[in-house]
Image (tube, rainbow, N blue to C red):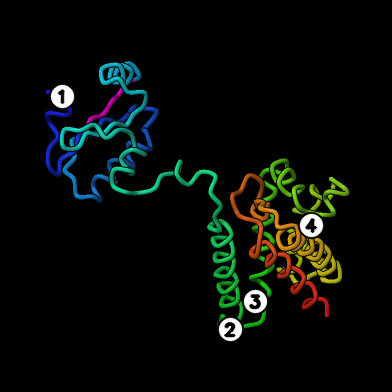
């Protein structure tokens, strides 16, 4: 009896790879999705490469996992998500999103509140705001430093100073993280503040020109290269925050 014959109302038949050295993550995701949708699952394991290849040949499919519902082969994990009206990674590919920036700023803010509470017993301190900006600078610097080449390639698309001197695109993430670390420590502010003001000012002018004067639609390198964060208000905010932090701590 094949998968189509065994599946029925509220029952699904799933075939997925479960081997000693590899468990298919998409198979686990498919099983979890089916459970959340209220299906009774017949969970079949493909335990070897030979068994997997034989299954693909028998059912004329190129990938696993494969799911049948109500006698109909739905397909792989992406097909299953679409069956239930959900988006897939492929659907979101290439689309811009502020999610990475929101995650960084939100986590940095909560970290700053946590440090403020640990140090003074309250989150309502000026130092908490200072720490928020400084921690965010460090995290954004880390994002850029993960892949300097990718960051440079994207950064060169809009930064005015980097376009005149390409080496600045290499220096920028180190400078951002360096200034943030010193501001967290409250040390060498005479050095950290001018660095933050300088890179923030160049960045703000560059973003403003690219977005609001030239009307260019670019992706921002603020969270590293190859990101899908649109160049715009959030990118401008990052630079304005650095300028404000530098001026505040300097004067």
Q: Which residue is mark 4?
A: 175
The tag earlier along the polypeptide, 2 or 3, is 2
> Where 80 sits versus 237, above or below?
above
Magenta range: 44-48
**Mark 4–mark 2 contact, CB under 8 Å?**
no
- Could you say whether the residue bearing mark 4 is in a helix, strand or loop? helix
The residue tagged with tag 2: helix, strand or loop?
A: loop
- The stretch drawn in magenta includes residue 205: no
- Rendered location of residue 61, percent (x, y): 32, 23
Say which label, 3 or 1, has the lower sequence index: 1
Q: CA distance from mark 4 to mark 1?
A: 62 Å
- In the displayed structure, 170 sits above or below 19; it is below
Residue drawn at the location 29% of the way across and 18% of the way down: 51
Q: Nearer the viewer, mark 4 or mark 1?
A: 1
> Local crowd at mark 1 within 10 Å, few (<14), some, or many (≥20)?
few
Tag nearer the camera, 3 or 1: 1
Q: Which residue is mark 3?
A: 129
Of residues 92 and 124, the one drawn nearer to the viewer in this rendering: 92
Which residue is labeled 1 in the image?
2
* Residue 124, disc: 2
**How far is mark 4 from mark 3, CA to CA?**
21 Å
4 or 2: tag closer to the N-terminus: 2
Rendering coords of residue 191 (x, y %): 85, 66
Q: In the rendered image of this protein, does residue 59 appear above or below residue 34? A: above
Q: Main secondary structure of the magenta part?
A: strand
Quadrant position of the N terminus in the picture: top left
Q: CA distance from mark 3 to mark 1?
A: 62 Å
Residue 226 seen anywhere in this rendered image of the structure = yes
Helix, strand or loop at label 3? It is helix
Asked if residue 142 shows in the view, the reply is: no
Q: CA distance from mark 4 to mark 2?
A: 29 Å
């Amino acid at each position: 009896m094949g998968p189509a014959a065994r599946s029925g109302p509220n029952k699904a038949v799933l075939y997925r790879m479960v081997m000693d050295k590899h468990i298919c993550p998409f198979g686990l995701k498919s099983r979890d999705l089916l459970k959340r949708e209220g299906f009774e699952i017949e969970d079949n394991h493909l335990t070897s490469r030979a068994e997997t290849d034989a299954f693909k040949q028998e059912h004329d499919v190129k990938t696993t996992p494969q799911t049948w519902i109500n006698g109909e082969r739905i397909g792989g994990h992406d097909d299953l998500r679409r069956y239930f009206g959900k988006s897939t990674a492929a659907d979101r590919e290439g689309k811009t999103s502020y999610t990475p920036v929101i995650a960084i700023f939100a986590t940095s803010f909560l970290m700053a509140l946590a440090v403020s509470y640990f140090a003074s017993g309250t989150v309502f301190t000026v130092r908490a705001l200072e720490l928020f900006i400084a921690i965010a600078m460090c995290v954004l610097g880390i994002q850029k430093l993960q892949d300097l080449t990718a960051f440079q390639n994207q950064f060169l698309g809009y930064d005015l100073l980097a376009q005149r001197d390409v080496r600045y695109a290499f220096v920028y993430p180190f400078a951002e993280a360096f200034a943030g670390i010193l501001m967290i420590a409250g040390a060498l502010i005479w050095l950290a503040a001018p660095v933050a003001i300088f890179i923030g000012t160049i960045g703000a002018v560059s973003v403003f020109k690219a977005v609001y004067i030239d009307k260019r639609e670019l992706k921002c390198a603020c969270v590293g290269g190859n990101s899908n964060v649109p160049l715009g208000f959030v990118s401008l905010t990052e630079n304005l925050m650095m300028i404000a932090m530098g001026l505040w701590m300097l004067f």
